Amino acid sequence: MNNESRKLSFGDYFERTMVFVGLFIIVGIVQLPLQLIILGHFSNLINLLIGALYLIGFAVAIGIALYIFKRYARPATKLQLTGNNIKWIVYSWLAFFVIEIVLGMLNQAVYYVNQTSNNEVIQKMMTSSHLTLVLMGITAVFCSPILEELVFRGFLIGAFFNAKSFWAPIIVSAVIFSMAHMETINVISFLTYALLGGILGYLFVKTRNIKVSIGLHFLNNLIAVGMMIAQIVMVN
C-alpha cells in the first residue's frame, strides 16, 4: 500500500476524504434508475431502457471505484483467491449467519420486525415488478459486492490506513458501512451491518486481497437474495 512509504499530510487526508464522499454518493445514486421504474410512470419499453441504464451505471461506478482504489491504495497485483481464502470466506459467512439469526430474533423482540430495514427496502423493490426483481437480483448479488468492497474496504482502508494498522480500519470501515445501509434508526440493524462490515474489513486487513472480502460479500448477498426470491415465489 502507498501509505507504508510516507506519512499522510492534512492535504492528503482532505483530498482522500473528498474522494470518499464522492464514492459514497456514487454508491447511492446508482440505485436512482431503479426508483424511476418503481414509480410506474413509464411504458415497458422505457422501463427496459432505464433498466439498461441502471446496469450501465453500475458498471461505470465499479470502473470509477476500481480506478480510484488502484490509484490511492496501490494494492498488490495478481493476488488470487486461494483454497485457504475460500475456507475463510465460508467460515466467516457461517459465523455471520449465526450472529444474524441471534440479532434477528432480538430485532423481532425489541422492534417487532422480521428483517433489517435495508432488507425490507430491497424486498419491496424486488416485488415491485418482474423487471425490478431481475435487476435487483443481478446487482445485489454481482454488482453491489464489488462496488461496496472497493469503496468501504479497498479505498477506505487502503487509502487512509497503513499496513500496520489493524483494528482502527476495521472499526471505521464497519461503522461507515453500516451507516450506508441504515434506512431507519434501529440499533440492532445498525449492529448487524456493522458486524458484517467488521468481518469484511477483518478479511481485507488480514489478506490485503480485495477479492477475499468481495467473495464473502458475494456469498452473503447470494444467499440472502436467493431466500428473498424464494419467499416472493412462494407468496405469489
Image: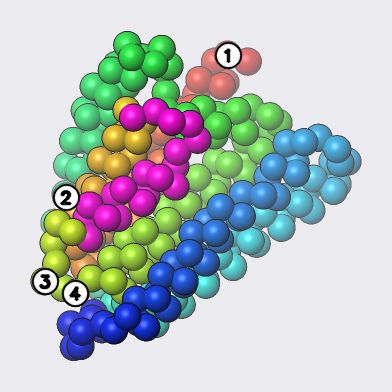
Magenta-drawn stretch contains 42 = no
Circle 3 or circle 1, nearest the eye: 3
* Residue type indicated by callout 1: Val
For mark 2, what is the residue? Answer: 88
Q: Is residue 224 above or below residue 173?
A: above
Disc 4 residue type (three-letter): Asn
Between the C-alphas of marks 3 and 1, the distance is 50 Å
The three-letter amino acid code for the residue at tag 2 is: Trp
Report the amino acid beneath label 3.
Answer: Lys
Label 3 Cα neighbours within 10 Å, binned few <14 / some 14-19 / many ≥20: few
Q: Nearer the viewer, mark 2 or mark 4?
A: 4
Q: Name the residue at 70% across, 50% down.
A: 33
Q: Look at mark 3 in the image and give the residue it sits on.
A: 164
Residue 230: percent from left, percent from top: 50, 24
Residue at screen point 80% across, 45% down: 47
Extreme front residue here? Answer: 10
Q: Mark 1 vs mark 4: give the one in front.
A: 4
Q: Is residue 149 above or below residue 114?
A: below
Q: Is the magenta stretch mostly helix, strand or loop?
A: helix
Label 1, on which residue? 235
Q: Of tags 3 and 2, which is closer to the observer?
A: 3
- Element assignment for label 2: helix
Q: Kindly identify which residue carries mark 4.
A: 162
What is the spatial separation of the Cα atoms under label 2 and label 4, in whole angstroms?
23 Å
Image quadrant occupied by the N terminus: bottom left
